[in-house]
Amino acid sequence: MSAETAKGMRATLRRWFFDPIDASSLVVFRVIFGAAMLFEAVNYGIFLCLDCTYREPDFLFKYQYFEWIRLLPGPGLELVHLMLGIGGIGVMLGLYYRASAVLVVLCFGYIFLLDQALYLNHYYLALIFATILVFLPANRYWSLDARRRPEIRSATVPAWTRLWLGAQLEIVLLYAGIVKITADWLQLEPMRLWMNARSHDAAPVFQWLTQDWGIAIASYGAIALHLLGAPLLLFRRTRLAVFCIYAVFHLTNSLVFNIGIFPWITLGATLLLFDPDWPRQVLRWFQARGRALRWQALAQPVDMTRSTSVRVNVFLVAGILVWLGVQATFPLRHHFRPGNVTWNEDGHRFSWRMKLRSKRATAQFYVKYADGTILDIDNAEHLTRTQIRKMACIPDLIWQYAQFIESEYGRDDNEDLAVHVVSRCSLNTREAVPLVSELVDLTSIERRTPSREWLLPNTKPLPRYLF
């Protein structure tokens, strides 16, 4: 490598990571995200029946390697939501910001890991953003910390703050389009199934989404929006138009599907792709019309940016690149495993495979004792309706529940018993077929056992096609 090339690379890295940029757009995202966490804490901590969701079932499903997560005794769960709300307020106001961000990660992470059956992609995205915010100096400007401690105040932040969040968002958006290039999605399933179910109660403005031509526009449009729109957000000429389309897309999803805070934190992060000083531009626009004089003091930048050591910078660049590398490659892991990921779920989670499958299933478990006695298990005695619905067609959850049954129904410590399941699962309107062979003793399977060794394949075609 020539000296000139090396010099150019260093200049590029310096520009991408360490050039000072306006802090106001990062502050806006901090406020939006903190408000979303506060909303989650209030919405789920007060209006969700925590007893029904977490305390009444006898068993909560666990993520691999996080089996040690346990339900807190007494009012512990309510306390976690209270602390999440306090953390959200702290992040939103920039008050004791670092501690507040860590509190959000711990509380939201605990709730996220408490029951695997409740996994949602937008919870995972929120946890990712919360973790990144811990490391960002988002409290240097327009914050109570900056008022308390003038020495930290700065109108600029290093460019890596925007790069990290923006690159993370681009990864999510691109994968949201890539994963939809499947035979089922291109034949309008499961979108057709969901929209047909809403045809009678859909608002007039959304009736077009219940027709095949409208479903085709939505299905193919979602792919185009993510694969074309996400890169176009990086260019100034196309950014605003694409953002407006994304806003309509997310608003429609929010009204049609119950996806919580996902549209709002995604749109908040998308604003980071605009010029870093876009909030200040908006303020100046209002000031020019005499409508925001009270904000004039906020519109005057005061730059107190501090430099960091070369060693810190090297670790910072390496850490961000490793993080983004993992985020970019981890969703691909199902390609290295046999079988259809939509059927066996092997690599489905944490891969931004959003709204790709609809599964309807039944799973009847029974215990077979050594003396030949057979005992049928009533799932409703141990699980909630949501857990039963999710578990019945997800192999990992079936396996976990079988281990629970083994421990719950063993008549003595030395007794040899087997747990079997009669399962039938329908994938995206296909005819229901067995997921697990009834001959398989689930207690003899380990969690790391490849799914091909104990799952049955699904070779059923979709019952109808658009083309």
Image (tube, rainbow, N blue to C red):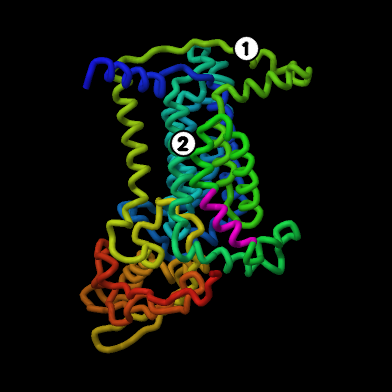
The range drawn in magenta is: 214-224
Q: Label for residue 300?
A: 1
Q: Residue at x 36, y 37 (%)?
A: 324
Residue 90: x %, y % from top left: 54, 30
Near-viewer residue (136 or 73): 136
Q: Residue furthest bottom?
A: 372
Q: Amino acid at mark 2?
A: Leu
Q: Label for residue 368?
A: none
With respect to residue 233, does 412 lie above or below? below
Mark 1 or mark 2, earlier in chain: 2
Near-viewer residue (269 or 225): 225
Near-viewer residue (467 or 59): 467
Q: Residue at x 43, y 47 (%)?
A: 110
Q: Which residue is mark 2?
A: 103
Q: Would residue 331 be seen by someone viewing this image from the given angle? A: yes
Residue 218 lies in the magenta stretch: yes
Q: Main secondary structure of the magenta part?
A: helix
Disc 1 crowd rating (10 Å Cα; few below 14, some 14-19, many 20+) is few
Q: Nearer the viewer, mark 1 or mark 2?
A: 1
Q: Is residue 203 left or right of residue 128?
A: right
Marks 2 and 1: in contact by CB < 8 Å?
Answer: no
Residue 4: x %, y % from top left: 28, 15
Q: Secondary structure at mark 2?
A: helix
Name the image quarter holding residue 382: bottom left
Give the quarter of the figure containing the N terminus. Answer: top left
Q: Amino acid at mark 1?
A: Gln
Near-viewer residue (51 or 294): 294
